[in-house]
Image (cartoon, grey):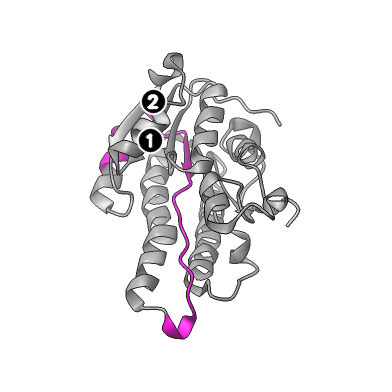
């Protein structure tokens, strides 16, 4: 896949996670002029900084922001020179039987997996429309199209994320703009946290952050101009 982000400015949310670290590396390797990374905990930012080369750190803009708070997202995007690509990796799952799941936890899953994406896409898209160019890439889940037991809130939120992304793709089919929106649907991603929480017995079936990250960064590049509204399954061997 041809991936060239030379001269482009990328908003990358969820960069401090297991997938995010690999996507950060690939975005910088693709030549992005600047990468804006919001963070909530200083320790998470420090851990990510430790794996970025000194030569690349100058291209990273760190912003303390909560992507579930509209005013902070608006300020985050406004501080960027341009917003050529939005890569939204924020998410998380919580298990529980539907009849025992609290409404508070339900709301939290929607906020974390769907509402944050809406805010980031909304303000990123405003900049993209003004520029006439942009790429939006979101990360849903296999559960969005194949829901699993005890994951109703997570799967519902991720299904909403697919719908949001595809709706944006339809809204940006203007003749005079080059804006795309696509979503990837991974199964379990092979991260240290997932190995810790789920054990390593089936890790050979999981999706590697490197392969998923390569696809994400390609979709965020100019080369992906003819891919819009795609919901791409990335299941590994699961």
Q: Is residue 135 magenta?
A: no
Mark 1: which secondary structure? strand
The residue where tag 1 is placed is: 37
Q: Is residue 237 above or below residue 222?
A: below
Residue appearing at x 45%, y 66% in the figure? 94
Residue appearing at x 35%, y 31% in the figure? 46
Residue appearing at x 68%, y 28% in the figure? 2
Horizontal arrangement in the rendering, residue 203 relative to residue 39 (left or right)? right
* Residue 77 in sight here: no
Farthest-out residue, bottom = 99
Residue 138 locus on image (x, y percent):
52, 49
Residue 107 locus on image (x, y percent):
36, 70
Residue appearing at x 23%, y 49% in the figure? 71
Residue 81 locus on image (x, y percent):
35, 27
Mark 2: which secondary structure? strand
* Residue 149 in sight here: yes
- Magenta range: 75-100
Q: Residues within 10 Å of mark 1 (few under 14, many from 20)?
A: many
Residue 168 locus on image (x, y percent):
51, 54
Q: Nearer the viewer, residue 103 or 77?
A: 103
Q: Is residue 83 magenta?
A: yes
Q: Nearer the viewer, residue 19 or 33?
A: 19
Q: Nearer the viewer, residue 139 or 148?
A: 148
Horizontal arrangement in the rendering, residue 206 relative to residue 10 (left or right)? right
Horizontal arrangement in the rendering, residue 122 relative to residue 42 (left or right)? right
The residue where tag 2 is placed is: 60
């Amino acid at each position: 896949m041809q991936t060239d982000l030379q001269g482009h400015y990328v908003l990358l949310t969820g960069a401090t996670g297991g997938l995010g670290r690999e996507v950060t590396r690939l975005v910088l390797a693709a030549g992005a002029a600047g990468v804006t990374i919001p963070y909530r905990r200083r320790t998470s930012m420090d851990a990510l900084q430790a794996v970025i080369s000194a030569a690349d750190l100058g291209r990273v803009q760190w912003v303390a922001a909560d992507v579930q708070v509209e005013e902070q997202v608006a300020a985050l995007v406004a501080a960027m020179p341009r917003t050529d690509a939005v890569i939204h990796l924020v998410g998380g799952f919580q298990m529980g039987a539907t009849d025992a799941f609290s409404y508070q936890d339900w709301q939290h899953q929607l906020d974390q997996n769907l509402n944050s994406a809406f805010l980031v896409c909304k303000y990123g898209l405003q900049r993209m429309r003004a520029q006439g160019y942009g790429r939006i890439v979101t990360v849903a889940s296999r559960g969005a199209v194949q829901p699993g037991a005890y994951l109703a809130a997570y799967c519902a939120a991720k299904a909403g994320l697919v719908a949001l992304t595809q709706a944006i793709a339809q809204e940006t089919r203007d003749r005079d703009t080059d804006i795309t929106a696509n979503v990837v649907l991974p199964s379990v991603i092979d991260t240290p946290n997932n190995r810790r929480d789920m054990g390593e017995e089936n890790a050979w079936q999981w999706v590697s952050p490197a392969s998923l990250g390569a696809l994400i960064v390609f979709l965020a590049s100019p080369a992906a101009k003819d891919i819009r509204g795609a919901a791409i399954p990335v299941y590994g061997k699961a």
